[in-house]
Amino acid sequence: MAAVATRLRPPLLGLIALAVIVATAPSRASAQLSVSFYANTCPSVFDTVRAGVSSAVTRESRMGASLLRLFFHDCFVNGCDGSVLLEDTGSFVGERTARGNQNSLRASMFSVVDGIKAQVDRACGASVVSCADILAIAARDSVVELGGPSYSVPVGRRDARTASLDAANNDLPSPFEDLDILIRKFRNKGFTPRELVALSGSHTVGFAQCRAFRTRIYTPGADLDPSFAAARQANCPATVGQGDGNLAPMDPQSPNRFGNNYFQALINRRGLLRSDQALFNGTSTDDIVREYSNDAGAFSRDFANAMVKMGNLMPPSNSQGEIRLDCKRVN
Ligand code: HEM
Ligand SMILES: *[C@@H]1O[C@H](CO)[C@@H](O)[C@H](O)[C@H]1NC(C)=O
């Protein structure tokens, strides 16, 4: 390169430099998020979201887990762009009816997000913060509110003007999937198996419905503790259609406390979802589960880093985006 450069005359060098700059200019796909993005336009955004999350979790302790999951379901479908929040209308199909969302995402979660958006807009005197950023901040604040690790949340995302039901159906993991499928779905989003295990540690908080774990607790095997199965069966009838919505904690010890008990539950063959137990079932991820169960600090670090990485998932570069006025619909 240096040998070539010495033979080029300065004007030509300048042109080449310009071409390189244009070619590498940030597209939406690699847009740089920054913690200070709203420093001038909405300096109180972080305080306002934190206050909103805190009061929502005080009202209902499960809401922290629900907001964390909502962010995951946003980011895994064409990037973190608020697409999961969009409601279906006569002429618009959103993602709310996707397999992983329907009968699972609750109206109260969307109300909480709408409430926080309204508070942020009021605090800053204008609608300048995207719904996608509010979700990203709220997910972090939920983790902290429940006693988990904190991390910085870079912001500057834009809200999608589209959604994809197909992508939601294809890209969101299902609780019935095997480890190789889970690994593939996370690899498709740029995550390693270790990051899959760390992010699945989110199941240290929150609840699942009978419909999501019925098959597992009625399928005896070496991967299932029989006394755990019996306890769960008491509140989850075998018959499909009965008690489908009955809840069980994914971390039996402390569903409202973010910690690493979840991993010990997996080692004890007490993973609630089949997809949980798949992480500890005689394969290469067993060692990671053991490590996280023994080392809460390693889990916290890896989890926080993976959350920031998840927040970097961007929509396709041809989508311009907008700052939505109402998180439920495009402007
Ligand atoms: C590894 C693949 C994953 C699968 C198959 C999966 C599946 C599920 C299922 C089926 C539920 C229960 C939903 C219901 O019954 O209504 C659930 C709950 C939850 N998931 Fe996951 N999940 C996965 C990964 C993740 C990740 C990566 C996160 C966050 C980073 C996450 C966060 C949560 C939380 C916090 C809850 C509790 C929600 C609540 O109580 O409202 N999950 N997940
Ligand atoms: C665990 O492995 C066994 C044997 O390969 C398999 O039959 C079972 O379905 C697996 N369980 C989970 C939860 O992946």
Image: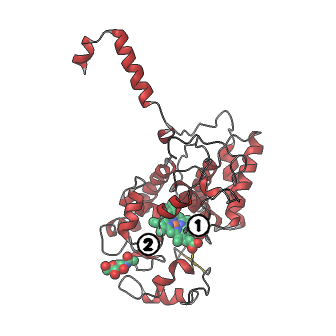
- Residue 56: mark in rendering: none
Task: Specify whether 250 is left or right of 108.
Answer: left
Q: Name the residue under label 2.
A: 275
Q: Where is residue 121? Give x, y as percent.
A: 74, 44
- The amino acid beneath tag 1 is Asn
Q: Where is residue 307? Give x, y as percent.
A: 49, 53
**Residue at coordinates 35% horizontally, 67% vertically from top-left?**
180
- Disc 2 crowd rating (10 Å Cα; few below 14, some 14-19, many 20+) is many
Look at the numbered disc 1 and say if its residue's Cβ is closer than 8 Å to ligand 1.
Answer: no
Cβ atoms at labels 2 and 1 below 8 Å apart: no
Q: Where is residue 83? Give x, y as percent.
A: 60, 53
Of 46 and 88, nearer the camera is: 88
Please tell me whether mark 2 or mark 1 is closer to you in this view. Answer: 1
Look at the numbered disc 2 and say if its residue's Cβ is closer than 8 Å to ligand 1.
Answer: yes
Vertical arrangement, residue 226 with respect to residue 120, above or below: below
Q: Where is residue 294? Give x, y as percent.
A: 38, 67
The image quadrant where one finds ligand 2 is bottom left
SS state under label 1: loop
Q: Mark 1 points at which residue?
A: 101
Vertical arrangement, residue 241 with respect to residue 160, above or below: below
